[in-house]
Image (cartoon, rainbow, N blue to C red):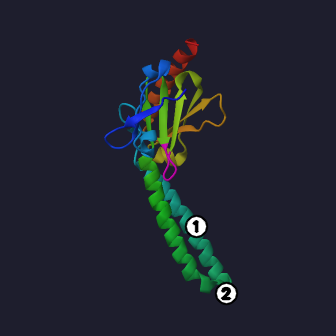
């Protein structure tokens, strides 16, 4: 049964007064949507900024290939020369926007190890918060592709019973990935033994 609203705080937001058994619970007051993605205590651990450099390098390679294909089309088909400047301008705008988006996405990625669960926050425009209880983890997967290894990065992927769980932390130093792998495996085993 929801608590009835009985008055307003000094900022004008409604204040719920406890009613019955639910009155023993203390709920934090949310002042905005961003509070949904804030930790109740502590701070987010951040991923390495070199992930942004890696993703921007891949972006430059892909954009370079697209420009090369368009230039070859312009040489082969004379009618496409008229489209070269407008397509180039659109390509620069899209490339600049993607460059900014990569930086924002990497800056927003964070994770926090709590007593009972792991929180992962990510997203550039659409923020997403994933909370994985340690007892629900089935597998901890560590990966590092050739480009990631060249930049000194690794990723930790958590697998649970739900196939929809996308609990992945990219952009970790190899030492941090190994520490997190060992800690999550230990906490996952402890959580399962408590069931």
Q: Residue furthest front?
A: 6
Q: Residue at x 50, y 66 (%)?
A: 95
Q: Is residue 93 visible?
A: yes
Residue 97 percent location from the top left of the image = 48, 64
Report if residue 123 lies within the magenta region.
Answer: yes
Q: Nearer the viewer, residue 171 or 24?
A: 24
Q: Residue at x 50, y 71 (%)?
A: 92
Residue 57 percent location from the top left of the image = 48, 58
Q: Which residues are magenta?
A: 122-127
Residue 43 percent location from the top left of the image = 36, 35
Quarter location, residue 136: top right
Label 2: which secondary element = helix
What residue would you read off at disc 1? 65
**Rendered image: mark on residue 101:** none
Name the side, left or right, on which 154 lies relative to 76.
left
The mark closer to the camera, 2 or 1, is 2
What residue would you read off at disc 2? 79
- 106 to 164, vertically: above or below: below
Label 1: which secondary element = helix
Report if residue 128 lies within the magenta region.
Answer: no
Distance of mark 2 from mark 1, alpha carbons? 21 Å
Q: Nearer the viewer, residue 30 or 181?
A: 30
Q: Residue furthest top?
A: 194
Q: Residue at x 43, y 45 (%)?
A: 34
Residue 8 percent location from the top left of the image = 37, 38
Rendered-image quadrant of the N terminus: top right
Circle 2: is it few (<14), some (14-19), or many (20+) Cα within 10 Å?
few
Which of the marked residues, 2 or 1, is nearer the chain's N terminus?
1
């Amino acid at each position: 049964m929801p608590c009835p609203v009985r008055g307003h705080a000094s900022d004008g937001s409604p204040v719920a007064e406890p009613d019955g058994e639910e009155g023993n619970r203390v709920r934090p007051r949310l002042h905005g949507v961003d509070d949904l993605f804030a930790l109740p205590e502590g701070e987010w651990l951040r991923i390495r900024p070199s992930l942004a450099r890696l993703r921007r390098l891949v972006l430059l390679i892909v954009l370079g290939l697209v420009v090369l294909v368009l230039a070859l089309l312009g040489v082969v088909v004379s009618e496409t020369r008229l489209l070269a400047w407008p397509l180039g301008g659109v390509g620069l705008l899209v490339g600049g926007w993607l460059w900014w988006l990569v930086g924002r996405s990497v800056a927003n990625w964070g994770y926090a190890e709590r007593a009972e669960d792991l929180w992962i926050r990510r997203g550039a425009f659409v923020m997403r918060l994933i909370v994985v209880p340690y007892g629900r983890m089935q597998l901890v997967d560590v990966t590092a592709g050739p480009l990631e290894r060249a930049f000194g990065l690794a990723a930790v992927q958590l697998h649970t019973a739900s196939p929809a769980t996308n609990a992945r932390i990219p952009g970790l130093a190899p030492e941090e990935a190994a520490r997190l792998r060992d800690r999550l495996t230990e906490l996952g085993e402890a959580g399962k033994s408590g069931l």
